[in-house]
Every structure is written in C-alpha cells, then in structure tokens.
Image (cartoon, grey):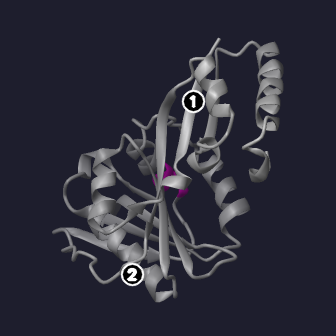
Amino acid sequence: VASELFPTEYSVKLFEKIMEIARKQDPKEIKFTLTNRLFVNSPLKTKFNEMGLTPVQYEFWMELEDFSLLPKSNMPLGITFQKLKELEDYDTYVDILNDAFSKAFDSEVFTPEDYKSIIDVNWKKFDVEYYFAKENNKPIGFCTVMVKPPIHDRGVIMTLAVYHSHHKKGIGSYLLGLGIKTLIEKGCRIIELGVEGENAHALALYKRFGFKEVESQTMIDFVYSS
C-alpha cells in the first residue's frame, strides 16, 4: 500500500482481501510485517486489535551519526582479520550465519547456493566489502558492509555474525569497528543497521558504539494462527 493510503480505510480493505485469499490456502499461520511509521496512524491498528493480533517481534532500525565518541576495541588475542572485496568461501560464510542466527525469531536456514544467489542478484552491483575474523586461519566471524545506493553518504552494516562458541571474546566488537571505519573512509555520514528486539547482546553492542533507534522505521511482526 502506498504510504499516503495507510491512514485511510483502503489499507483495511486490502488487508481483508489478502486475508480472504490467504485463508483459502489453509495455512497454519500468516505473518504480517509493518513499519511503525505506517502502522501507528493506520486504521489497521484498530482492525488488528479487533482480531486479537498483537506484536510478536520487533526489529529495530538504528542509525549512527556521531562518530566522535566511537569506543576503541582491542584486537582479540590469537585472532587475525582479513578484508575481502568479493566473497570466496560461501560454505563457511553460511555456516557462521546459520549458527549465529539459529535462535532468531524468524530464523531461516540458508544454503551456500541460496546466499550466492542473493549476493549475485542483489549485492554484486553495489559497493560491498567483507571483514573476516580468523582463528588458526579458520573463519569464525564476519562483518558485511555496503554503501547504500543511491544515497552514497549512507552506509549499512548488512551482517555481523560470530560463531556462538566465540562470543564474548571481543570479536564482534572489533569486526563492527572495522566495518564502521571502512564506511567512514568511503564518505558515509550516517551508518544504519537492523537488529531483532530480543537480541539483547547485539543491542547493547550497537548502543555502546552510539547507534540510536529510529522509532518510525521499527519493523513490527504479527502472526495470525488459523
């Protein structure tokens, strides 16, 4: 729905039509995702309340604008870091990704083929770089950053992931610092990222680096069970 139509009854009528079509498929559940900016002033809010739909998950969108107070991260002992312009080892990349986000609300197990397709279609045409953390020359974590097109003064931390077995060793913090530094060097004045509301560890890390929630861009998940 066009953003200007969300405050009108058109959004409710469209939602009811989508529900009608979806129910014919007899799914066990139907998931809806809306941004807080559009939902808060929409009659959909009343409609969802009538149906007993309540948020089951929030994904916060966060921005970093003040680079003057970035914390210093010490390089973890025994860990090396490698910068890549193109991804080489899809198998390891996806293995780290699946392990790191296995407990996420809407986790989906990716295959190397899945991610190669995503990168080939969506990322390769953009300015993307990868930082890998390695222990004994084996990748254990990574940070993926992108200069956001077409607004080249905005950068995005696309993914930050570390094997669970290597959490709380300062690896994620150091990777994040490298990613931020790269985007600043590329001329980005604002750096963005998304994080699940239940991921308290990641939220604390991002807030420590100065990221602040953009409340209007918070994504809200609802699930309707038939």
Magenta stretch?
90-94
Of residues 71 and 146, which is closer to you in this image? 71
Q: Residue under circle 2?
A: 181
Residue 91 placement (x, y as % from top left): 51, 52
Tell me, yes or no, whether the highlighted magenta stretch contains residue 92. Answer: yes
Q: How many marks?
A: 2
Measure the alpha-carbon separation of dots 1 and 2: 36 Å
Q: Where on the picture, by quarter, is residue 99?
A: top left
Residue 141 placement (x, y as % from top left): 36, 59
Q: Does residue 4 appear to the left or right of 79 in the view shown?
A: right
Say what secondary structure mark 1 lies in: strand
Disc 2 marks a residue whose amino acid type is Lys
Q: Residues within 10 Å of mark 1 (few under 14, many from 20)?
A: some
Q: Which mark is residue 222?
A: 1
Q: Residue at x 64, y 56 (%)?
A: 116
Residue 52 placement (x, y as % from top left): 56, 17
Is 94 rendered above or below residue 131? Answer: above
Residue 7 placement (x, y as % from top left): 72, 43
